[in-house]
Amino acid sequence: MALFRKTPDERAEGQAKIEASLTKTRQGLFGRISALFQANELTDETWEELEELLIQADLGIDTALRVVERLRTRVHRENIKREDEVRAALADELTRLLTHPAMTSIEEPRRLSVILIVGVNGSGKTTSIAKLAQYYKRRGKRVVLAAADTFRAAAIDQIKIWGERIGVEVIAQAPGADPGAVVYDAIRASQESRQAELLIIDTAGRLHTKYNLMKELEKMRGVCARQVHDAPHETLLVLDATTGQNAISQAKHFKEAAQVTGLILAKLDSTAKGGIVFAIEEELGLPVRFVGTGEKPDDFAEFDPRAFVNGLLDIGY
Protein backbone atom coordinates (compact mmCIF):
# COMPACT_ATOMS: atom_id res chain seq x y z
CA MET A 1 0.00 0.00 0.00
CA ALA A 2 1.36 3.39 -0.96
CA LEU A 3 2.02 5.99 1.68
CA PHE A 4 -0.67 8.65 1.69
CA ARG A 5 0.53 12.24 1.61
CA LYS A 6 -1.73 15.29 1.61
CA THR A 7 -1.52 17.61 -1.37
CA PRO A 8 -1.25 21.39 -0.80
CA ASP A 9 -4.92 21.72 -1.85
CA GLU A 10 -6.01 19.10 0.70
CA ARG A 11 -3.95 20.81 3.39
CA ALA A 12 -5.53 24.17 2.55
CA GLU A 13 -8.99 22.58 2.57
CA GLY A 14 -8.38 21.17 6.04
CA GLN A 15 -7.14 24.52 7.33
CA ALA A 16 -10.22 26.27 5.93
CA LYS A 17 -12.56 23.75 7.60
CA ILE A 18 -10.86 24.23 10.97
CA GLU A 19 -10.99 28.01 10.68
CA ALA A 20 -14.67 27.97 9.65
CA SER A 21 -15.59 25.64 12.52
CA LEU A 22 -14.18 28.12 15.05
CA THR A 23 -16.60 30.95 14.21
CA LYS A 24 -18.53 30.43 17.45
CA THR A 25 -15.31 30.26 19.46
CA ARG A 26 -13.92 33.46 17.90
CA GLN A 27 -17.14 35.26 18.78
CA GLY A 28 -16.85 34.08 22.38
CA LEU A 29 -13.96 34.18 24.81
CA PHE A 30 -11.18 34.20 22.24
CA GLY A 31 -12.73 37.24 20.62
CA ARG A 32 -12.48 39.01 23.96
CA ILE A 33 -8.86 37.87 24.24
CA SER A 34 -8.00 39.41 20.87
CA ALA A 35 -9.72 42.65 21.88
CA LEU A 36 -7.52 42.92 24.99
CA PHE A 37 -4.49 43.85 22.94
CA GLN A 38 -6.13 46.77 21.16
CA ALA A 39 -5.37 49.08 24.10
CA ASN A 40 -2.46 51.48 23.72
CA GLU A 41 -0.65 50.00 26.72
CA LEU A 42 -0.41 46.53 28.22
CA THR A 43 -0.84 46.86 31.98
CA ASP A 44 -0.87 44.46 34.91
CA GLU A 45 -4.65 44.46 34.59
CA THR A 46 -4.34 43.37 30.95
CA TRP A 47 -2.30 40.31 31.90
CA GLU A 48 -4.64 39.44 34.77
CA GLU A 49 -7.65 39.64 32.49
CA LEU A 50 -5.87 37.49 29.90
CA GLU A 51 -5.26 34.85 32.58
CA GLU A 52 -8.93 34.91 33.57
CA LEU A 53 -10.15 34.62 29.99
CA LEU A 54 -7.81 31.72 29.20
CA ILE A 55 -9.00 29.90 32.31
CA GLN A 56 -12.63 30.53 31.34
CA ALA A 57 -11.80 29.18 27.87
CA ASP A 58 -10.94 25.81 29.49
CA LEU A 59 -7.14 25.91 29.21
CA GLY A 60 -6.89 25.07 32.89
CA ILE A 61 -5.30 27.23 35.58
CA ASP A 62 -1.71 25.98 35.38
CA THR A 63 -1.61 26.07 31.58
CA ALA A 64 -3.13 29.56 31.45
CA LEU A 65 -0.61 30.93 33.97
CA ARG A 66 2.34 29.44 32.07
CA VAL A 67 1.15 30.86 28.74
CA VAL A 68 0.65 34.35 30.14
CA GLU A 69 4.02 34.34 31.91
CA ARG A 70 5.85 33.27 28.75
CA LEU A 71 3.97 35.81 26.64
CA ARG A 72 4.56 38.63 29.11
CA THR A 73 8.29 37.86 29.26
CA ARG A 74 8.53 37.75 25.47
CA VAL A 75 6.65 41.05 25.02
CA HIS A 76 9.03 42.83 27.39
CA ARG A 77 12.16 41.16 26.02
CA GLU A 78 11.33 41.90 22.38
CA ASN A 79 9.70 45.27 23.13
CA ILE A 80 6.53 44.23 21.30
CA LYS A 81 4.00 47.07 21.07
CA ARG A 82 1.68 46.57 18.12
CA GLU A 83 -1.59 44.75 18.70
CA ASP A 84 -1.08 42.35 15.77
CA GLU A 85 2.41 41.46 16.99
CA VAL A 86 1.14 40.68 20.50
CA ARG A 87 -1.58 38.44 19.05
CA ALA A 88 1.01 36.71 16.85
CA ALA A 89 3.23 36.13 19.89
CA LEU A 90 0.27 34.66 21.81
CA ALA A 91 -0.44 32.42 18.82
CA ASP A 92 3.16 31.17 18.93
CA GLU A 93 2.92 30.39 22.65
CA LEU A 94 -0.37 28.54 22.24
CA THR A 95 0.91 26.56 19.25
CA ARG A 96 3.91 25.46 21.32
CA LEU A 97 1.48 23.64 23.62
CA LEU A 98 0.22 21.42 20.81
CA THR A 99 2.40 18.43 20.05
CA HIS A 100 1.77 17.06 16.60
CA PRO A 101 3.59 14.06 15.10
CA ALA A 102 4.33 14.47 11.42
CA MET A 103 2.35 11.38 10.44
CA THR A 104 -0.14 9.09 12.16
CA SER A 105 0.50 5.36 12.18
CA ILE A 106 -2.57 5.00 9.97
CA GLU A 107 -0.59 6.33 7.04
CA GLU A 108 2.43 4.03 7.26
CA PRO A 109 2.60 1.64 4.29
CA ARG A 110 1.09 -1.75 5.17
CA ARG A 111 -1.50 -4.15 3.78
CA LEU A 112 -4.12 -3.39 6.43
CA SER A 113 -4.21 -0.63 9.03
CA VAL A 114 -6.43 -1.18 12.07
CA ILE A 115 -7.90 1.58 14.24
CA LEU A 116 -9.78 1.10 17.51
CA ILE A 117 -12.20 3.92 18.35
CA VAL A 118 -13.11 4.46 22.01
CA GLY A 119 -15.21 7.01 23.86
CA VAL A 120 -18.34 7.44 25.94
CA ASN A 121 -21.80 7.20 24.43
CA GLY A 122 -23.01 10.62 23.32
CA SER A 123 -19.54 11.97 22.60
CA GLY A 124 -20.04 11.82 18.84
CA LYS A 125 -18.20 8.50 18.51
CA THR A 126 -20.37 6.90 15.83
CA THR A 127 -20.49 10.05 13.70
CA SER A 128 -16.71 10.47 14.06
CA ILE A 129 -16.17 6.89 12.89
CA ALA A 130 -18.25 7.58 9.78
CA LYS A 131 -16.39 10.84 9.13
CA LEU A 132 -13.01 9.15 9.55
CA ALA A 133 -14.07 6.44 7.10
CA GLN A 134 -15.28 9.06 4.63
CA TYR A 135 -12.05 11.05 5.05
CA TYR A 136 -9.87 8.12 4.00
CA LYS A 137 -12.30 6.82 1.39
CA ARG A 138 -12.09 10.21 -0.35
CA ARG A 139 -8.32 9.75 -0.41
CA GLY A 140 -8.54 6.42 -2.19
CA LYS A 141 -8.38 3.92 0.66
CA ARG A 142 -10.66 0.88 0.76
CA VAL A 143 -12.32 1.08 4.18
CA VAL A 144 -14.32 -1.41 6.27
CA LEU A 145 -16.14 -0.71 9.55
CA ALA A 146 -16.56 -3.21 12.41
CA ALA A 147 -19.58 -2.85 14.72
CA ALA A 148 -17.92 -4.23 17.86
CA ASP A 149 -20.10 -2.24 20.28
CA THR A 150 -22.43 -5.20 20.64
CA PHE A 151 -23.84 -4.10 24.00
CA ARG A 152 -26.27 -1.71 22.30
CA ALA A 153 -28.41 -2.76 19.36
CA ALA A 154 -28.73 0.93 18.51
CA ALA A 155 -24.95 1.22 18.12
CA ILE A 156 -24.92 -1.55 15.53
CA ASP A 157 -27.85 0.00 13.67
CA GLN A 158 -26.22 3.44 13.66
CA ILE A 159 -22.98 2.09 12.19
CA LYS A 160 -24.93 0.24 9.50
CA ILE A 161 -26.91 3.37 8.60
CA TRP A 162 -23.74 5.41 8.31
CA GLY A 163 -22.07 2.65 6.28
CA GLU A 164 -24.91 2.75 3.75
CA ARG A 165 -24.84 6.54 3.67
CA ILE A 166 -21.13 6.84 2.86
CA GLY A 167 -20.82 3.60 0.86
CA VAL A 168 -18.59 1.66 3.26
CA GLU A 169 -19.16 -1.99 4.20
CA VAL A 170 -19.94 -2.83 7.82
CA ILE A 171 -19.11 -6.16 9.48
CA ALA A 172 -21.56 -6.86 12.29
CA GLN A 173 -23.17 -9.63 14.32
CA ALA A 174 -26.30 -9.78 16.44
CA PRO A 175 -26.60 -7.63 19.59
CA GLY A 176 -24.91 -9.32 22.55
CA ALA A 177 -22.35 -11.12 20.37
CA ASP A 178 -18.74 -11.42 21.50
CA PRO A 179 -16.96 -8.19 20.41
CA GLY A 180 -13.74 -10.16 19.91
CA ALA A 181 -15.52 -12.41 17.41
CA VAL A 182 -16.77 -9.36 15.51
CA VAL A 183 -13.21 -7.99 15.34
CA TYR A 184 -11.90 -11.38 14.15
CA ASP A 185 -14.53 -11.62 11.39
CA ALA A 186 -13.91 -8.03 10.33
CA ILE A 187 -10.14 -8.54 10.03
CA ARG A 188 -10.51 -11.74 8.04
CA ALA A 189 -13.08 -10.12 5.73
CA SER A 190 -10.87 -7.05 5.30
CA GLN A 191 -7.83 -9.17 4.44
CA GLU A 192 -9.56 -11.66 2.18
CA SER A 193 -12.83 -10.93 0.37
CA ARG A 194 -12.89 -7.13 0.77
CA GLN A 195 -9.18 -6.44 0.15
CA ALA A 196 -9.50 -3.45 2.48
CA GLU A 197 -6.64 -1.15 3.44
CA LEU A 198 -8.20 0.36 6.56
CA LEU A 199 -10.39 -1.25 9.23
CA ILE A 200 -12.07 1.04 11.76
CA ILE A 201 -13.49 -0.72 14.84
CA ASP A 202 -16.24 0.73 17.03
CA THR A 203 -16.06 -0.30 20.69
CA ALA A 204 -18.45 -0.14 23.64
CA GLY A 205 -19.03 3.40 24.82
CA ARG A 206 -19.71 2.49 28.41
CA LEU A 207 -19.14 -0.61 30.55
CA HIS A 208 -19.96 -0.96 34.23
CA THR A 209 -16.42 -0.54 35.55
CA LYS A 210 -13.01 0.50 34.27
CA TYR A 211 -11.89 -3.09 34.90
CA ASN A 212 -14.56 -4.43 32.52
CA LEU A 213 -13.65 -1.81 29.94
CA MET A 214 -9.97 -2.67 30.19
CA LYS A 215 -10.58 -6.40 29.89
CA GLU A 216 -12.88 -6.02 26.90
CA LEU A 217 -10.43 -3.76 25.09
CA GLU A 218 -7.49 -6.01 25.97
CA LYS A 219 -9.34 -8.91 24.38
CA MET A 220 -10.02 -6.94 21.19
CA ARG A 221 -6.44 -5.70 21.07
CA GLY A 222 -5.26 -9.30 21.42
CA VAL A 223 -7.42 -10.41 18.50
CA CYS A 224 -6.04 -7.55 16.39
CA ALA A 225 -2.42 -8.35 17.29
CA ARG A 226 -2.76 -12.04 16.46
CA GLN A 227 -4.26 -11.34 13.04
CA VAL A 228 -2.36 -8.23 11.89
CA HIS A 229 1.25 -7.28 12.67
CA ASP A 230 1.47 -4.51 15.32
CA ALA A 231 -2.31 -3.97 15.30
CA PRO A 232 -4.14 -1.96 16.42
CA HIS A 233 -2.02 0.72 14.82
CA GLU A 234 -3.93 3.58 16.44
CA THR A 235 -6.40 3.76 19.33
CA LEU A 236 -8.29 7.02 19.00
CA LEU A 237 -10.42 8.50 21.77
CA VAL A 238 -13.42 10.60 20.71
CA LEU A 239 -14.09 13.59 22.97
CA ASP A 240 -16.92 16.10 22.75
CA ALA A 241 -15.38 19.59 22.51
CA THR A 242 -18.43 21.08 24.25
CA THR A 243 -17.89 19.15 27.51
CA GLY A 244 -14.98 21.36 28.58
CA GLN A 245 -12.97 20.25 31.61
CA ASN A 246 -15.12 17.12 32.00
CA ALA A 247 -13.34 15.85 28.89
CA ILE A 248 -10.11 15.67 30.92
CA SER A 249 -11.48 13.08 33.34
CA GLN A 250 -12.92 11.06 30.44
CA ALA A 251 -9.58 11.14 28.68
CA LYS A 252 -7.68 10.03 31.79
CA HIS A 253 -10.05 7.10 32.26
CA PHE A 254 -9.67 5.86 28.70
CA LYS A 255 -5.95 6.55 28.49
CA GLU A 256 -5.38 4.17 31.39
CA ALA A 257 -7.78 1.53 30.11
CA ALA A 258 -7.31 1.65 26.36
CA GLN A 259 -3.69 2.61 25.53
CA VAL A 260 -4.98 5.64 23.64
CA THR A 261 -2.57 7.04 21.03
CA GLY A 262 -4.51 10.14 19.95
CA LEU A 263 -7.77 12.05 20.00
CA ILE A 264 -10.65 12.90 17.73
CA LEU A 265 -12.27 16.12 18.94
CA ALA A 266 -15.94 16.07 17.91
CA LYS A 267 -18.30 19.06 17.68
CA LEU A 268 -15.53 21.67 17.45
CA ASP A 269 -18.00 23.94 15.65
CA SER A 270 -20.39 23.86 18.62
CA THR A 271 -18.11 25.14 21.38
CA ALA A 272 -17.68 28.79 22.37
CA LYS A 273 -14.51 28.01 24.34
CA GLY A 274 -12.02 25.75 22.52
CA GLY A 275 -9.24 25.87 25.10
CA ILE A 276 -9.83 22.25 26.11
CA VAL A 277 -7.52 21.20 23.25
CA PHE A 278 -4.55 22.78 25.04
CA ALA A 279 -5.51 21.40 28.44
CA ILE A 280 -5.79 17.84 27.12
CA GLU A 281 -2.43 17.91 25.38
CA GLU A 282 -0.72 19.59 28.34
CA GLU A 283 -2.16 17.29 31.01
CA LEU A 284 -2.29 13.99 29.11
CA GLY A 285 0.36 14.28 26.42
CA LEU A 286 -2.08 13.00 23.79
CA PRO A 287 -2.11 14.65 20.36
CA VAL A 288 -5.36 15.66 18.69
CA ARG A 289 -5.36 13.77 15.38
CA PHE A 290 -8.67 14.86 13.84
CA VAL A 291 -11.48 17.34 14.50
CA GLY A 292 -15.17 17.32 13.60
CA THR A 293 -15.95 20.65 11.96
CA GLY A 294 -19.69 20.38 11.23
CA GLU A 295 -22.62 18.01 10.77
CA LYS A 296 -22.03 16.67 7.25
CA PRO A 297 -19.90 13.55 6.59
CA ASP A 298 -17.19 15.67 4.95
CA ASP A 299 -17.02 18.10 7.89
CA PHE A 300 -13.86 16.54 9.26
CA ALA A 301 -10.19 17.50 9.11
CA GLU A 302 -6.80 16.33 10.21
CA PHE A 303 -5.82 18.57 13.09
CA ASP A 304 -3.46 21.41 12.19
CA PRO A 305 -2.18 23.22 15.33
CA ARG A 306 -1.28 26.44 13.57
CA ALA A 307 -4.59 26.58 11.67
CA PHE A 308 -6.43 25.93 14.93
CA VAL A 309 -4.65 28.70 16.87
CA ASN A 310 -4.86 31.17 13.97
CA GLY A 311 -8.58 30.42 13.73
CA LEU A 312 -9.08 31.05 17.44
CA LEU A 313 -7.31 34.42 17.28
CA ASP A 314 -8.52 35.38 13.79
CA ILE A 315 -5.02 35.57 12.34
CA GLY A 316 -4.72 35.19 8.57
CA TYR A 317 -2.13 33.06 6.80
Image (cartoon, rainbow, N blue to C red):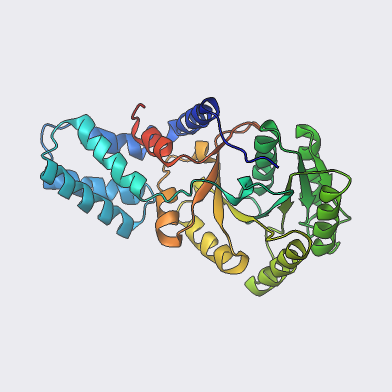
Q: Position of residue 238 (x, y in %)?
A: 59, 51
In the displayed structure image, the side of residue 78 where residue 99 appears, left or right: right
Residue 12: percent from left, percent from top:
49, 27
Task: Tell whether 87 sits left or right of 235.
Answer: left
**Which residue is nearer to you in this view: 262 or 111?**
111
Using the rendered view, name the quadrant where residue 152 is placed: bottom right
* Residue sitting at the far bottom: 211
Q: Is residue 24 above or below residue 188?
A: above
Residue plotted at (71% across, 57% down)? 203
Q: Is residue 291 above or below residue 182?
A: above
Point out the image quarter for the N terminus.
Answer: top right
Tell me if 225 is positioned left or right of 193 in this view. Answer: left
Q: Nearer the viewer, residue 4 or 22?
A: 4
Q: Residue 94 in the image: state x and y as whole percent.
A: 33, 46
| Residue at image point 85% right, 43% down | 194
Q: In which image quadrant can residue 296 be found?
A: top right
- For the C terminus, the image quarter is top left
* Horizontal side, residue 129 vs residue 303: left or right: right
Residue 210, placed above or below residue 159: below
What number of labels is visible? Answer: 0
Residue depicted at 28% across the width and 34% down the height = 34
Say which quarter of the image contains residue 174.
bottom right
Residue 91 appears at what percent x and percent y?
Answer: 31, 40
